[in-house]
Image (cartoon, coloured by chain):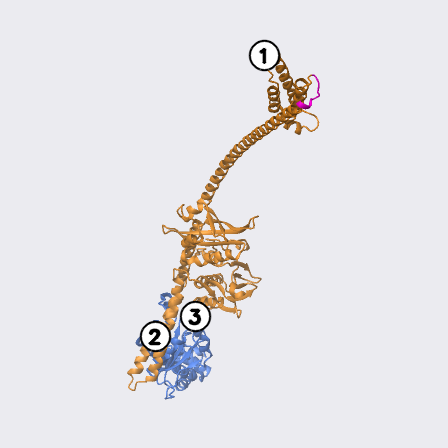
Amino acid sequence: MMSTSRSSWRPSLAAILAYAVAILSVMTALVTGLLLDQFLQTMPYVSLFLCSIMFAAWFGGLGPSLLATVTATLLFTYYFVDPGGSFEVAAKDVPRVVLFATTALFVVSLSAAQRRNADSLRFARDELQATVQELARVNKALEAENARRRRVEAYLDEAQELSRTGSFSWKVSSGDVFWSKEGYRMLELDRTAKPSVDLFLQGVHPDDRHVVQHEIERGQRGEQDYDYEQRWQTSSGMTKHLHVRAHRVHFDSGEDEIVGALIDVSEARQAQEALHAAQTALAHAARVATLGEMSASIAHEVNQPLAGIVTNGEAGLRWLDRKEPDLGEVRSAMERMIRDGKRASQVVERLRALARKAPAPTMALDLNEVITEGAALLQREIQNHRIALQLDLARDLPPVLAGRVELQQVVINLMMNGMQAMEPVTGRPRRLIVRSSRHNDEVLVSVQDSGVGIDPDNIGRLFNAFFTTRANGMGMGLSIGRSIVESYGGRIWASNNDGPGTTFQFALPVRAQAAS
Amino acid sequence: VRRGPQPPQPAKSLPVVFVVDDDPSVREALSSLFRSVDLEVELFGSAAAFLQRKPSDRASCLVLDIRLPGVSGLDFQAQLQKANIRIPIIFMTGHGDIPMSVRAMKAGAVDFLAKPFRDQDMLDAVAAAIQRDRQARETEDSMATLRTAYGLLTAREREVMALVTTGLMNKQVAGQLGLSEITVKIHRGHAMKKMNARSLADLVRMAESLGLHQPKAHQP
């Protein structure tokens, strides 16, 4: 039946067979009935016809069973209803025929229903089977996919561990936080701990908490990109340096998440700190060496007020010991002693600052002050070298962000350099000009000498460590000067003058706050 | 140029101390010290400032810092000598510099004091320097008198004086100059009188002072 309906106009072979079987089964029932009537004198026609109809229905479905019913009814009418041998029906036998036909149709409908049920059952079973097969296939594919993903995840974990990069995500709306295996490892958190913003904040170094808090607030405000560094305190008390980079990802579902990477930069940071410490130590050594070169001047600088104090004291005593003590003179002698004492301690303080090992904290600096102080320290040196020093300082110079002692070291070094370059000069004035000025967002300091100048071949190597043109030079001064200037985001260079001598210059960025 | 307060007595014979140091503190301290022992003081911040001052006709000395802006103390000492300004110098230095002190002393410095110095050392050095200057001035004064007197001699009288004071007899002098002995005697008498010499020995000493017998003798 299904097959006929499916194969539109051309009946399929199965349909033809079904109809043929229907006719055949009715015929078989007739023949069997006739034979049984002949030899056993029983009349099982009705039962046999019904059986054949049931068979046709079972075998072929509704169509063939209806055909069988019609055929069986016709045959029943022809053979077994009076008058026999014709299709006429006597009035008295009409109920018999109708009953037969009704019974047959009932059987057909029952069979059809049964067959329908069987069909739908079979269909359902087939469908189930197909579904099961599909599921099995999908399952297999899923397993393969899973295996692949596990492998990829393992690669990813491996890569994260090797690169010390953990990944994390934060769904701001729900507060759901995720971090990867390497994230756990890096933060040294127990794998069972449920990631959360609060848990993360607990491990942040106290000094950096405000930084992280600020970034979290940015996240809550909906900012797009995140890039900052923070320190992390592990439960074992270690401090790690983390570089956090993240951005906001918008999903099709309309939700968005902050997805990012935690990078452990502790080693780089430690290396940087070690380098910085080495540079600081080197700069200190160079300062001490400079102080050594200046020792004669320094002795004088300290001795001068001491001599003043001693002489004033002795003079004061003499004024007191006179027949008529002159208390006015004593008083002014004592005032001068106090002034000299303060002056001596200022000199010592300046020297101590230069000789101090720990670097001065970075602060907003007036470069003019740095230059004037450097010149004050070098005053004797300048006199001894018979140098005319000219300070040409711009007014209202904006401050730069740097360490006072370090910059003083750079200035002193450049001035000493200039003086040494002028040592062989006899035929012309030994003039050292120190200028300060502002150029756009930079403060520029230049130290111009009228010395012997620099061989153009050497100008590129001037700032290299251990490069020197002096017989007793170490070749560290300018190289240290460069590392100091560069550490504050500046640059340093040298050029020969149009006339005799060289000009060294360095530029430092104007402190951002002051510039805006 | 800073000057110390003037002492009450304007006596011309009172000595004066010049201080040249670029450090005002040291200058003022020295001024106080010298004034406390009634020495007159004049203060200068640089060698150039001192040079601008008129030369003093009083006994004086110079207290000089060896490290000065512009010209060093040693160079300044040489400059003064070149300019024929004779003044005893006491050097001060911030730190004991032996080669410098040797140079300074060789060039005629009275003393060399390392800062900080003892007040008595400074005062002794100043006293010695003033004493030396006083003597030098006296010598200078008598030399000036001698030169003035010598300037009054005629050429012939000078010739006679030069030869007589070498120990030659009048006769020998007359022979050398082609004069008569009498004429030599007259010239000699005039020379003795003009030079205010009481004896021949006196005249010989004067000739020595005037350097008449040396080949590089100073001639007025």
How far apart marks 3 and 1 lie (CA) works out to 166 Å
Q: Residue at 32% of width from left, 84% of height from top?
A: A327
Q: Which chain is blue?
A: B
Residue positioned 40% across, 54% down in the render: A202
The image quarter in which residue B55 lies? bottom left
What SS does tag 1 mark? helix
In which quadrant of the rendered view does residue A101 lie? top right
Report the predominant secondary structure element of the magenta stretch.
Answer: loop
Q: Quadrant of residue B105?
A: bottom left
Q: Which amino acid does label 1 sit on?
A: Leu
What amino acid type should be assigned to the residue bearing mark 3?
Ser
Label 1, on which residue?
A: A40
Residue B202 image offset from top left, x and y in percent? 35, 82
Q: In this view, does B105 lie above or below B201?
A: above
How dense is the environment of label 2, judged by Cα within 10 Å: few (below 14), some, or many (20 and up)?
Answer: many
Chain bearing mark 1: A
Of badges 3 and 1, the one in the foreground is 1
- Image position, residue A281 (x, y; %): 40, 56
> Is residue A237 placed above or below A406 in the rendered structure?
above
**Nearer-the-camera pick, B60 or A310:** A310
Task: Give the residue pinned by disc 2.
Answer: A309
Magenta stretch, residue numbers: A85-92
Which label is found at residue B72?
3
The three-letter code of the residue at mark 2 reads Ile
The secondary structure type at the circle numbered 3 is loop
- Image quarter where the N terminus of chain A lies is top right
Q: Which chain carries label 3?
A: B
Q: Does the magenta stretch include residue A91?
A: yes
- Cα gap from disc 3 to disc 2, whole angstroms: 24 Å
User: Tag 3: Cα neighbours inside 10 Å, few (<14), some, or many (≥20)?
Assistant: some
